[in-house]
Amino acid sequence: MVNVGIVGGTGYTGVELLRLLAGHPEVKVTIITSRAEAGRLVSDIYPNLRGHFDIPFSEPDLDALSACDLVFFATPNGTAMKLVPELLERGGKVIDLAADFRIKDIPLWEQWYGMAHSCPELVAEAVYGLPEMNRDAIRSASLVANPGCYPTATTLGFLPLIEAGLVNLSGLIADCKSGVSGAGRGASVGMLMGEVGESFKAYGVPGHRHMPEIRQNLSVVADRPVDVTFVAHLLPMIRGIHSTLYATLTEEVDLQALYESRFSSEPFVDVLPAGSHPETRSVRGINHCRIAVHRPQGGNTVVVLSVIDNLVKGAAGQAIQNMNIMLGMEETLGLRAVALLP
Amino acid sequence: MVNVGIVGGTGYTGVELLRLLAGHPEVKVTIITSRAEAGRLVSDIYPNLRGHFDIPFSEPDLDALSACDLVFFATPNGTAMKLVPELLERGGKVIDLAADFRIKDIPLWEQWYGMAHSCPELVAEAVYGLPEMNRDAIRSASLVANPGCYPTATTLGFLPLIEAGLVNLSGLIADCKSGVSGAGRGASVGMLMGEVGESFKAYGVPGHRHMPEIRQNLSVVADRPVDVTFVAHLLPMIRGIHSTLYATLTEEVDLQALYESRFSSEPFVDVLPAGSHPETRSVRGINHCRIAVHRPQGGNTVVVLSVIDNLVKGAAGQAIQNMNIMLGMEETLGLRAVALLP
Amino acid sequence: MVNVGIVGGTGYTGVELLRLLAGHPEVKVTIITSRAEAGRLVSDIYPNLRGHFDIPFSEPDLDALSACDLVFFATPNGTAMKLVPELLERGGKVIDLAADFRIKDIPLWEQWYGMAHSCPELVAEAVYGLPEMNRDAIRSASLVANPGCYPTATTLGFLPLIEAGLVNLSGLIADCKSGVSGAGRGASVGMLMGEVGESFKAYGVPGHRHMPEIRQNLSVVADRPVDVTFVAHLLPMIRGIHSTLYATLTEEVDLQALYESRFSSEPFVDVLPAGSHPETRSVRGINHCRIAVHRPQGGNTVVVLSVIDNLVKGAAGQAIQNMNIMLGMEETLGLRAVALLP
Amino acid sequence: MVNVGIVGGTGYTGVELLRLLAGHPEVKVTIITSRAEAGRLVSDIYPNLRGHFDIPFSEPDLDALSACDLVFFATPNGTAMKLVPELLERGGKVIDLAADFRIKDIPLWEQWYGMAHSCPELVAEAVYGLPEMNRDAIRSASLVANPGCYPTATTLGFLPLIEAGLVNLSGLIADCKSGVSGAGRGASVGMLMGEVGESFKAYGVPGHRHMPEIRQNLSVVADRPVDVTFVAHLLPMIRGIHSTLYATLTEEVDLQALYESRFSSEPFVDVLPAGSHPETRSVRGINHCRIAVHRPQGGNTVVVLSVIDNLVKGAAGQAIQNMNIMLGMEETLGLRAVALLP
């Protein structure tokens, strides 16, 4: 049994960590911090946790946190980088679900996130926590930068094509759609049901923070700069991301075989039969990415359809997958549920 | 490990049984029948089951079914009564999730369900599978009639008041609202998203099949005839039932204490703190009924708010709870997940 | 052509006034005020108004407002009572869409709205703007208190029964459900789509501000105190209120004939054929209340189903209906659209 | 006043024609046919039409239809082509809202629609009813092929770029998302709210009937073959299409000025200010297409965002716009409402 702490447990990512960890046979959550809700029972805010977590939120405390085997940061961008250095110094292991350690290029990070980075040296050390790219490095990491939701769905979808060097790297397009839980649980007019229900729109077309992350991932895979146009859209539903990816083939290939082969040993990537159209509900509540690959009318445009639950494989589930790897546990532990459908 | 079969696995109740049984440590599903889909993989129709149930639907076969330790019928009304007699004769145990064995008054059943009953003698023998009323009888039953969704939420909500003889039995009102999954997965214009999305209506006000079932339950509890006005409504969402119940108090009582005491040892009934308003999402995907009891402005009208997931405590989850009891397993086995929120 | 002003045009009630007045052949909106958005174009905030209202929000200005033939207040509770006295003194006509002038009993108002009333003498003078109750008084009124959304649907539904003295006045129940737009456009965690989508709950069961308003209306109709239990619920959709009303008959009556007769000359109340179940979408965007009346199984409980669009007949549409009456125009002017279905 | 008939009035396109024509000052609907519902009142099926259309559905009758000034066909594909020849011979004017006359290449049409065309000679004569491309030809047409919903949003979005010869014609991408009303009102499991609510998926990626229509339109504009990859997706909402279009610029241009100039005299195309993201709700219920054009990070990829209401500009509204043009009426007559928001 390992003890874990969660810093910033009141957002959707925090409650999702708790939901999933409640079913993890080898983990005990000993600390859940929240400055705003300190003293209040976790289950008062999240009634679905009644009977599962009857502990209160507490103020963040470094001594208590460093007594944990691993600490998750489910905090806003810019919070983890303030506490992580000391935790690591004391020998802790950390998974940051925010963006503090995702972008290796510090000036680029500072430009997109609008603040100075307080521990750039740790960014270099941090491992980007996409197990399908970096499993070995994650195994020995002390600090894992858990990927963003759009980057996860998009990177997994493009991965086989780019690894195999089969597509033109300059005209990639990622047309991505997300449920509203991706925007978090902060009060805002823009995310009221009266504003986003029964409607659909793109957002952030001039520039979205997940774009540099996607470019970095694909460039690492290609081992040279990759350009991708990324457009995010907001779906009138709660959970789920659907990435529709477009690339131009530069040579002939059996796409279905390529994808099946690339992911055959991945426990959380499911390549659907040829001709399929994955639904976001097929991964609701679970850590899987389901992918289908198409080549409409036999042309040279590849269309990849990639779906995840933004709160699971796009956040808390992937964090637990990383924890399992870091702590030497079976990778799928606590992550074997069936998607909630209908 | 016990072997179970499911007759009629293609509807929402069937897939929900499969979803929940995938996580049950002591159960193996060996047969899933469907005449219409025989030969097709279960996971072809329900992609959330990929990797969990890679067996095909088969034609119903009595020999195979009677080799199971228990058989669930997730079939339309009128189907189970044709097969159950022979299964029981061969020593099988059966849980019917449809209505064939719920109503003890055969002419009343025949009037509401519009068909003749083919084995009225088994109706007498069948145990109504609401564990909170009938746990002991369920333990030794061979045939359990799994309750309807509205009757489950409504009966549990009224139970403490009626058992304690505290309310007028002639003016009870159950104003109930259900998500669309309660209507099943059959093709119909009336349940298209274009028809039921972003709208709300009552239905079946002149008469609904769950009304005689609710009356029967409450009359059994009161040990005399209870009259209840039941109005069903259709919610523009998928899962969840909310029963708002009204009764007139005939004497003084501490309602909160009454409810907490009545359900203190029930693993799946959660009485919320005084002043609460349960949300249907707080039980999404789980077998709990959450209840709050109010007495607005201190008057003599009691308002009970009772929520369940219609596919879980209102169908498949309760069936598994009954199975656990019938087969001598721990009652909560396979039913300990956390509700999916948000 | 008449000139009207709108004070507080940024909320859902304000934009709905603008949407409806855009199609009114005899009205010109000359002023739309908003302190927060002064200087910004109305159509910048509400793109559906592009090409219809290309005027900016302005700071509220008494001189400008008193030059209008009529002023609508679409402001938070407590705002209108500060400005209305002077406007009336200068000879203006006012319709307040908030609650400042709805409750005749000042201490009761102050208790429920948590503030002192600054012009109680005007409350006595104000006419409650439900045309189906008070058409003649509205015709000559200078100050109209536009009814709340729940009170409109509920009062219209109970009206024929109580006027005719056919039901027990002590056990009335109003089980009401509203779309989220009823909560307005203020930022709040509780109304995020992630919180209220795909879920359903009651709220305010211990006490809701519309309860005293409903009681006042029904008591006026009955000419003696009427007690009603009112429970509000939140629907996972944007527009629409459904009131399900329960009463106990004290004598025999042809309910369908009673309702049809009572509302035969009402342009905005539509009594559906016997056996109907009105859908909220059947009044989406229009000023109608559609009503069906049932007597389940011929018992003595009457069930009335009453639907309105909370932003139209429950707010802006009814305000325009009142304006038409006050200014001597045809009552249905600007209010003849067809509901948006699907 | 002109008399019009509607053949096939029971689907969503039919009811939308009725909703819009109810507000058209110069049109009277004299016939609404439906074989299945003949004799039944229109308002029995569509309660929103109560008080507006109290005429019954009738069997289609050529004599009656040819007495109309214009006949709309809101029938399934393959129906109009059987009746239109005789109607035209008798001097009638026809607008077909289905696909019978959209594709000029008959073998291509027969391949995608899976049937033989019964009057190919009329296809040559028919005018494709996109006023922004073909206004003059529509003015003198007897037979107008009303465009499909995806082709309308997509063609309008690409139009300025292709007319001006500014983009590479071989790598165009149209990533399109539609509400469920686009699938019509036929009973099907796939469109149940339980199946499509709270989920999102692509469909028809290997090939969709609107693809050849889009290619034809763009090729006409470019005056040479244009290749476009078209992917359709299903949104969990009722109305609205959002086309996200990608093209590669081949020369420098002021995109905002180009779009504003191209559509400056179009009454139903609204180019939003630079940097905007149109929401589908901003056109709910109205005949407008709202467009924003972006060039992310100043690269050479243009991203166009184009939204319509699939039932209005994508079907019934555009048909009425065409009718207005064909019959010499003001083009915006009956189409001046404000979008329903929220």
Image (cartoon, coloured by chain):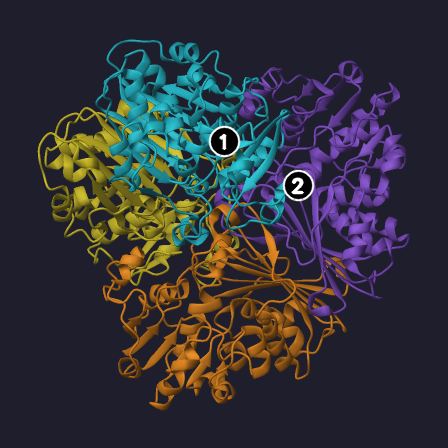
Chain colours: A orange, B yellow, C cyan, D purple
**Residue A54 at x, y percent in the picture:** 23, 64
Helix, strand or loop under label 1: helix
Give the residue at x 59% y 27%. Answer: C338
- The picture places residue D97, in percent across and down from the top left corner, at 74, 33
Residue that badge 2 annotates: D310
Mark 1 residue type: Val
Measured as percent of width and height from the top left, residue A257 is found at 64, 70
Callout 2 amino acid: Asn
Out of A5 and B61, give the one closest to the viewer. Answer: A5
Q: Nearer the viewer, residue B104 or D141?
A: D141
Q: Nearer the viewer, residue B241 or A68?
A: A68
Foreground pick, A114 / A321:
A114
* 1 and 2 marks on the same chain: no
Q: Is residue B117 visible?
A: no
Give how far apart the Cα atoms at labels 1 and 2 are. 25 Å
Q: Quadrant of residue B330?
A: bottom left
Which quadrant, please, contains the C terminus of chain C?
Answer: top right
Which quadrant of the view contains residue D324? top right
| Screen quadrant of the N terminus of chain C | top right
Up-down: is B176 above or below C277? below
Residue C132 drawn above or below residue D244: above
Residue C197 picture location, percent across and down: 44, 48
Is C70 left or right of D25, judged from the image as shown? left
Determine which residue is flagged by label 1. Answer: C312
> What subunit carries mark 2?
D
Question: Looking at the image, can residue D1 be seen?
Answer: yes
Q: Relative to C180, does residue B78 appear above or below in the rendering? A: above
Identify the secondary structure beneath mark 2. Answer: loop
Image depth: mark 1 or mark 2 in front? 1
Tag 1 subunit: C
Q: Is residue D8 left or right of residue D188?
A: right
